[in-house]
Image (spheres, rainbow, N blue to C red):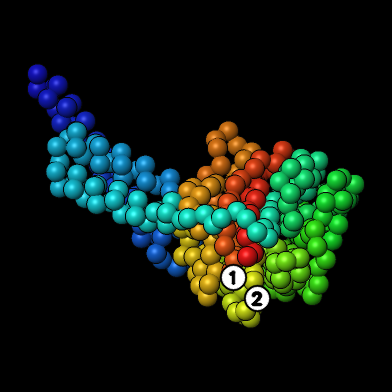
Amino acid sequence: MGTMAAMRKALRLVFLVLASLLVLIGIASIAAHFLTYSSAPAIAFTAFGPAWLIAPLVGLILFAILRRWLGSFIGVLTVALCVVVQLPMFLGTAAADRGVVLTVMQANIRLGEGDPAALAKLVRDNHVDILAVSELTVDAMTKLDGSTLSLDLPYTYTNALPQADGTGIYSRYPLESTEQMDGYAMTNLSAVTLVPGGGIVQLYALHLIPPYPHATRWSTEIDRARSTLAAVPSDRRVIALGDFNSTWDHRQYREFLRGGYRDAAETVGAKWLPTYPTNRWYPPMLQIDHVLVRGASVASVRSYSIPGSDHRALIARIPLG
């Protein structure tokens, strides 16, 4: 009997330590949401923000089973705060999908290996007007030029490069004031288009460097891109599409959302919309592809798979008035 009692006591201690660790993970995720840092492990931890809700929830359950009421109380507070932190992604309101609507799409095609026919079909089926392509290689560009994409989006501004460095903008409408932005590891582009009935729109196709193993450079590129967007005259509509290699839980990313800029997914309450990675045995966990808008509303944001890519594409419908 003494041996059994000792085993039960040891098991309770193990579960108590586990419950404490799980709740501490939740507390750490809340803190990480509000902090600014340039440490790769911290950046990676923060990227999984919504998933960390599971940890304190399990910890709370363990505390309740063990009848540790102080731990249970702390667990309840931690779970509640984790929920509050994520609520903005659930509380948005979609605008009416009517009038002049610009449909935009962000697609990272993984070193040019995304299926060009599937990408072109997504564009045609969803009547996409503007497409931003990350990781555009010369071979991928050639295949896209030979697809229906060249008919649907005949105006282009591209810089196709090996590996992950290339980027392209494909448009239904003529592109003007095209520019390659300096100071980035990968290609970042800007252009201006005139949408019939919708006015002038400033476009950006962004691909920021991954934080691992480039944490300091990642932070620098985010600051540079944010400054560029902030400098656009306030009376001009802006749509920025891209693989930001950061999630809504990163404070550095949320600092984009100033001066009238909004995350399209948050605006419509699209909830958790992870886009990466899609080539693993587990489902995508990170929402690192984004659509930012200023001076326009958002009617919808949805994600779509692209065979051969490790990202899901985002398609947003943006009423222009």
Residue at the spot 21% in from the left edge and 50% down from the top edge: 74
Where is residue 99 shown, x and y percent of the image? 65, 59
Q: Are marks 1 and 2 in contact (CB under 8 Å)?
A: yes
Q: Nearer the viewer, residue 187 or 151?
A: 151
Q: Quadrant of the C terminus?
A: bottom right
Residue 242 position (above or below residue 203)? above
| Element class at badge 2 | loop
Where is residue 153 shown, x and y percent of the image? 82, 55
Residue at the spot 64% in from the left edge and 42% down from the top edge: 304
Q: Which residue is mark 1?
A: 295
Q: Nearer the viewer, residue 53 or 83?
A: 83
Residue 95 position (above or below residue 37)? above
| Element class at badge 1 | loop
Where is residue 186 shown, x and y percent of the image? 72, 63
Residue 285 seen from this side: yes
Q: Quadrant of the N terminus?
A: top left
Apparent side of residue 59 relative to residue 207 in the rendered image (left or right): left
Residue 232 position (above or below residue 209)? below
How many numbered discs sit on the rendered protein?
2
Residue at the spot 12% in from the left edge and 25% down from the top edge: 5
Where is residue 225 shown, x and y percent of the image? 62, 71
10 Å crowding of disc 2: few (<14), some (14-19), many (20+): few
Q: Which residue is mark 2?
A: 236
- The kind of residue tagged 2 is Arg
How much space separates mark 1 and mark 2, taking CA atoms? 7 Å
